[in-house]
Image (tube, helix red, strand yellow):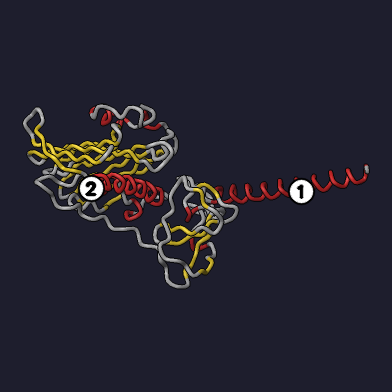
């Protein structure tokens, strides 16, 4: 009996050791993948995509884009910047700084034998024409910044692709409310006409006078969008609250005219709303289309809104986003 118990104990210990080694190997693999992507390792910006051997698959249509904070199972397919990737075993929960092209321990590049179904990153489009004398309430271009197109250093271009995707999700979410809302008109205390849209818990209000557009949108009584746009000069100041994560998060945007049909476009985000891994990017862009022309600046910082003097001042002028934006 003693030998049987000893054998059973040895068997259990071996199984436990095997599981521990498996977990250790997986952790080491992830750590190595992350290490290879650290600045200064494996060349500037980490391992290059073309250094990693792609697997050949017949890809289905309708592959969804990679989204942070999503739980991916082994062999799940995603698209990122026009490429297809397959999640490696045992799966993981995506994080904003674990981008598919730069973490080979988590993602395997895929070559689709039937043609790549991954769409190229969409071009920024002009907003819809004015309705009832009012410009479009939502224009995602102000909250997006294509740093990759202007040769931004390191992985900053890929990081802002994530920011751009979160902004797109936020605008689509609000646009679904606004497009199906009941539209009425009122006059404010200054005698300006106010366009009011209501759809369930959604309400937006905007004015447009002397080329100045001011707008605010709320869902369930909480602000999700506020902006001031000067259609005469191209200046813009606004903040959108992204609902794409467990904690709603701010993306702030500033556009400042610099002459010659050009403007400086600054975007500051804390897309996990955790006061860590915050990013700010700036580029000179075309004033009419907001297409990028020249890289200016990229920075990673920590601290949330309290570390963003421009955004903090804007939120104060807008009357606050209490209970939504951390760090303020």
Residue 296 seen by the camera: no
Query: Which numbered marker is on residue 318?
Result: none
Residue 226 seen by the camera: yes
Q: CA distance from mark 2 to mark 1?
A: 58 Å
Residue 199 on image: x %, y %: 24, 41
Q: Nearer the viewer, residue 312 or 202?
A: 202
Provide the residue designation for mark 2: 180
Image quadrant in which the C terminus is located: top left
Image quadrant in which the N terminus is located: top right
Residue 269 quadrant:
top left
Mark nearest the camera among 2 and 1 is 2
- Residue displayed at 90% across by 46% down: 4
Q: Nearer the viewer, residue 77 or 26?
A: 77
Left or right of 286, for residue 133? left
Residue 58 lies, with reference to residue 246, above or below; the image says below
Provide the residue designation for mark 1: 15
- Residue displayed at 38% across by 30% down: 326
């Amino acid at each position: 009996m003693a030998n049987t118990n000893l054998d059973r104990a040895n068997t259990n210990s071996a199984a436990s050791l095997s599981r521990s080694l498996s977990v250790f190997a997986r952790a080491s693999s992830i750590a190595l993948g992350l290490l290879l992507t650290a600045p200064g390792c494996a060349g500037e910006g980490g391992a290059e995509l073309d250094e990693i051997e792609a697997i050949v698959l017949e890809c289905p249509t309708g592959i969804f884009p990679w989204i942070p904070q999503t739980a991916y199972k082994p062999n799940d397919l995603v698209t990122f910047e026009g490429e297809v990737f397959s999640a490696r075993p045992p799966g993981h929960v995506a994080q904003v700084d674990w981008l598919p092209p730069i973490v080979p321990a988590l993602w395997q590049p895929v070559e689709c034998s039937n043609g790549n179904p991954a769409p190229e990153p969409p071009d920024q489009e002009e907003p819809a024409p004015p309705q009832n004398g009012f410009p479009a309430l939502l224009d995602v271009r102000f909250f997006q910044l294509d740093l990759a197109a202007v040769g931004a250093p390191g992985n900053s271009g890929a990081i802002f692709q994530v920011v751009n995707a979160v902004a797109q999700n936020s605008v689509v979410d609000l646009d679904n409310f606004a497009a199906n809302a009941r539209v009425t008109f009122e006059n404010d205390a200054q005698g300006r006409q106010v366009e009011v849209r209501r759809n369930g818990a959604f309400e937006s209000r905007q004015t447009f006078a002397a080329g100045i557009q001011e707008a605010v949108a709320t869902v369930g009584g909480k602000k999700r969008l506020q902006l001031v746009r000067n259609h005469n000069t191209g200046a813009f100041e606004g903040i959108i609250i992204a609902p794409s994560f467990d904690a709603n998060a701010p993306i702030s945007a500033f556009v400042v005219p610099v002459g010659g049909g050009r403007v400086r476009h600054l975007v500051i985000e804390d897309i996990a709303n955790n006061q860590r891994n915050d990013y700010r990017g700036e580029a000179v862009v075309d004033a009419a289309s907001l297409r990028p022309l020249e890289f200016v600046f990229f920075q990673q910082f920590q601290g949330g809104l309290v570390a963003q003097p421009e955004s903090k001042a804007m939120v104060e002028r807008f009357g606050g986003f209490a209970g939504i934006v951390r760090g303020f």
